[in-house]
Amino acid sequence: MLLPKSEKVRKTKILLAEDNRVNQKIAALMLSNVGYVVDIAGNGIEVLEALERQPYQIILMDIEMPEMDGLTTTQRIQELYPAEDQPYIIALTASAMQGDRERFLSVGMQDYLAKPFEKAALLNALLRAEESIASSTMKKSVHAEQSKVVDQENSPVAINAVMDDTIPKLNYQTLEGIQAMLGPDSSSFLAEVIDTYLIEAPQSIDDIISTINKNDDRCLVEVAHKLRSSSASLGLERVAYLCETLEKYGRGYISIVPSDYEPHLHAEYEAVKSELIAIKDRQAIAVQP
């Protein structure tokens, strides 16, 4: 899918590798509004196919994707293309686990962003990428600078209860940020994104419960990550928190009783569903006290 160009068109070609439709819409419109031409790939196989058709200077590479994940895709690019023809790859991850930065750099990625990311963080990452592309002799110093990124947000979270009551069910600042960032296009776009979420979230919850019942930790990580990512992008912090906990359980980082999370996941989604519908219908975010 080719997004429309803004008035100020940048020459850098970007490929967005992201399977989550909500995140696709937000990131792609964010990029096109600041002048980037961006194509979208839904998984690693589509990334490799896109690179066969044309070169891209930058790839925004989601880590968790079906069929071929971001790490495997990056390794394949390293194998298939000489160093001078390889794109600058920025990892996109909602996992934010300790040691992720080193893991991403070790397979050939140059930078990473933790989702959901703000416009300023994305533009700063793209600026770093363009500076590196413009001068290949600066790559080593760019890598060294990126190595200074602090891992505080990657620290493991201690889980003492199913839900941390201090977490808001809906972070209005996240939605207000989308509105402010997108300007006049925000109302219809936000309604479209909410519609997409309301269609996909119930199926994701069913998938999570199915994998819990089957004791399939690998699939639990995948489906919990998907719902967590789209929920966080819209500010649904309690739903995202539950998904994060289940994802960490699936990865073996914490010990919990997964079945305890089923009713809470349903309840937190239903608690915020009506508010999302109201926001969509009025196509604006009411200012919160």
Image (cartoon, rainbow, N blue to C red):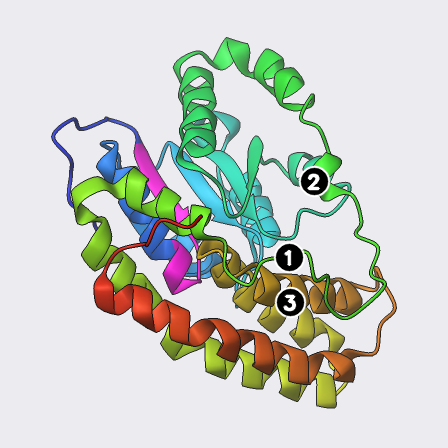
Quarter of the image for residue 105 reads top right
Query: What's the residue type where badge 2 is placed?
Result: Glu
Q: Position of residue 153 (x, y in %)?
A: 70, 40
Query: What's the residue type where badge 1 is placed?
Result: Ile
Is residue 19 shown in magenta? yes
Q: Quadrant of the N terminus?
A: bottom left
Crowd around label 3: few <14 · some 14–19 · many ≥20 (10 Å)? many
Among numbered discs 1 and 2, the one appearing first in the sequence: 2
What's the distance in space between the residues labelled 3 and 2, CA to CA? 17 Å
Q: On the rendered structure, is 118 left or right of 100?
A: left
Does the residue at mark 1 contact the one at mark 3 (Cβ under 8 Å)? no
Q: Nearer the viewer, residue 16 or 98?
A: 98
> Which residue is the site of mark 1?
167
> Which residue is the site of mark 2?
153
Does the residue at mark 3 contact the one at mark 2 (Cβ under 8 Å)? no
Q: Nearer the viewer, residue 17 or 257?
A: 257
Q: Nearer the viewer, residue 139 or 199?
A: 199
Nearest-to-viewer mark from 1 and 3: 1
Does the residue at mark 1 contact the one at mark 2 (Cβ under 8 Å)? no
Q: Could you tell me which residue is drawn at 31 percent across and 70 percent down?
A: 278
User: Which label is found at residue 132?
Assistant: none
Quarter of the image for residue 99 reads top right
Q: On the rendered structure, is 189 left or right of 156?
A: left
- Secondary structure, mark 2, is helix
* Residue 47 in sight: yes
* Residue 67 in sight: no
User: Which label is found at residue 243?
Assistant: 3
Is residue 211 shown in magenta? no
Give the magenta part as a residue range. 13-23
Among numbered discs 1 and 3, the one appearing first in the sequence: 1
Q: Is residue 245 above or below residue 189?
A: below
Q: Position of residue 30 (x, y in %)?
A: 31, 41
